[in-house]
Image (cartoon, rainbow, N blue to C red):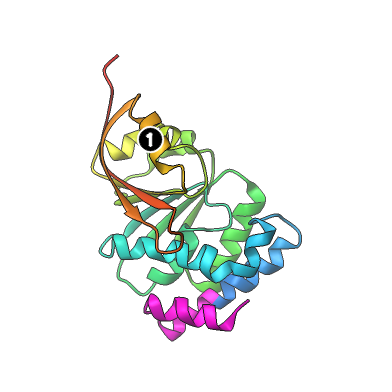
Amino acid sequence: MSTDLRSRVLTEHNVSRETASALDLYVAQLTRWQTVKNMVGPATLAEVWHRHIADALQLLAIAPDAKRWLDLGSGAGIPGLVLAIAGKGRPNFHVSLVESNARKCAFLSETARLTGAPVTVHNARIEAIIGTLTDIEIVCARALSSLTQLLAWTEPLLTSGTVGLFPKGRDAAAELTEAEDAWTFTRDLIPSRTDSQARIVRVTSLSRVDP
């Protein structure tokens, strides 16, 4: 881990000393669990502050006033658990984490307990639980599925006022084109602060294309 990179990320995102300590604990947990469960791509662990922490934190800057978040396919807690750690000092801030893998849920639960992150961990499949989650302001998902599939999963939320924030790589434009065959939606592409070729797709309304 580069100490300089860590410091730069914390400074750029105006992270408090308390939050920085909690993020350090998260990174330590991720490193420990990586030895027994492939939590993230092994090559990315050495760049965890840039590839994962900063990549997650940029979502807070896009929706700074949102308090109720939902992260689908949370895996190693990116972005959901990182967002919860960063937002835990904000009144009523909460992140729901949905993950179908029980061992990854164990990581999420243990790390949330150690860091004091305000989360609820749902060990469930997305399609089984999405309809039961209410009062969600922002739904996000990173490296989970195509935009077309993400819109299908999140339809109950995006058609009722929830905003979607979906980080995408260099194929974002192609995914948008594919999704527009099945969906009508209002969206914009926000440049990623961690990858010049990546974009964050912000979806603010959704309806099905008439057959």
Q: Indicate the quadrant containing the N terminus: top left, top right, bottom left or bottom right.
A: bottom right
Estimate the x, y position of residue 51 in percent, counting from the top left: 54, 63
Q: Residue 84 lies in magenta, yes or no?
A: no
The image quarter containing residue 29 is bottom right
Estimate the x, y position of residue 179 in percent, counting from the top left: 37, 31
Q: Nearer the viewer, residue 79 or 5?
A: 5
Tag 1's secondary structure? helix
In the picture as drawn, the residue positioned furthest to the top comes out as 211
Q: Say which residue label 1 marks.
A: 151
The image quarter containing residue 13 is bottom left
Question: Where 32 sits versus 128, above or below?
Answer: below
The residue sitting at 47% across, 37% down in the picture is 146
Estimate the x, y position of residue 86 in percent, counting from the top left: 42, 71
Estimate the x, y position of residue 70 in percent, counting from the top left: 40, 51
Predominant SS of the magenta segment: helix
Question: Where 119 sits versus 25, above or below?
Answer: above
In the picture as drawn, the residue positioned furthest to the right comes out as 36
In the picture as drawn, the residue positioned furthest to the bottom comes out as 17
**80 left or right, relative to 105:** left
The residue sitting at 56% across, 77% down in the picture is 24
**48 left or right, relative to 37:** left
Q: Indicate the quadrant containing the C terminus: top left, top right, bottom left or bottom right.
A: top left
Question: Where 128 sits versus 102, above or below?
Answer: above
Badge 1 crowding class, 10 Å Cα cut-off, few under 14, some 14 to 19, many 20 or more, is: many
The residue sitting at 35% across, 64% down in the picture is 60
**Region rendered in magenta:** 1-23
Question: Where 56 sits versus 150, above or below?
Answer: below
Is residue 156 in sight in this rendering?
yes
Q: Amino acid at mark 1?
A: Leu
Q: Residue 6 lies in magenta, yes or no?
A: yes
Is residue 15 in sight in this rendering?
no
